[in-house]
Image (cartoon, grey):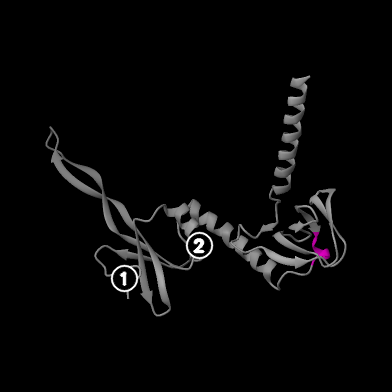
Amino acid sequence: MERRAIHLVLTVAACLVAGIEAAETQEHGVFYLEKWKLPPLQLKALGRTPLVVSPNENRLVACLAKGQPVTVIALGDAMDYVAARTATDEVRGWVDVKTLESPPDGLLEELRKRRERAAAHQESIARHEVALGMTREEVRASFGKPGERLNVRTADGEREQWIYETFRYLPTYQYDRDEKGQVRQMVSYAKTRVGRKVVTFRGDEVIVVADEVAGAAPALSPFPSGGN
């Protein structure tokens, strides 16, 4: 009997965890604001609104009252994922976008543009390239950890630069004669520093990608962090 009770408790706990994971599963085509580094959006319900467990399942989680505030976690074309407080607890679920106040003008369009840029950046990362508009995280994914970081001062304010040394395998040729006296050529390749790539950020966005030949003066003068 005791074993059955323990098994029942574990089964119920597993179902609860599965339910939470299902509710938090990120739906395709929906913009999760935290992923795009945007704060949660505060909107109000336009009328009595059902809150359901997922866009594809109408199992009721709660009902929102007219004028009840919600925190929008994710925006979609048809359904939004929100958090709301009931009399006893905070609940999360999906609501029809038409049942909430409209988000700020242009927000969804801006998120779509960001998604398109992110897709293009993934292609650059696959080629180990850096493109304008990339974030620090994307630059690290493409180039790895920078060899050096600098704070620089420009006419538009302080900027951060990431420095990557660039190398090429340059050939070295040697000649000798074989046992028949014929000249033969041998080639070897040595890893040689040829310059550096300088990635300049404004905030978290790449605004300049410059290649500098070894020995050339930097385009911007560095200064110590916190210096005058």
Mark 1 element type: strand
Q: Position of residue 39 (x, y in %)?
A: 63, 64
Mark 2 element type: loop
- Is 95 in the magenta? no
Identity of the residue drawn at 49% across and 54% down:
125
Q: Quadrant of residue 221?
A: bottom left
Kind of residue at badge 2: Met
Q: Position of residue 91 (x, y in %)?
A: 76, 53
Pair 1/2: label in front: 1
Kind of residue at badge 1: Phe
Is residue 183 rendered to the left or right of residue 75? left
Most foreground residue, 67 or 117: 67
Identity of the residue drawn at 75% across and 36% down:
15
Read off the residue under disc 2: 134
Picture layout, residue 57 above or below residue 196: above
How far apart are the alpha carbons under marks 1 and 2?
24 Å
Callout 2 crowding tier (Cα within 10 Å): few <14, some 14–19, many ≥20: many
Q: Are marks 1 and 2 in contact (CB under 8 Å)?
A: no
Q: Quadrant of the N terminus?
A: top right
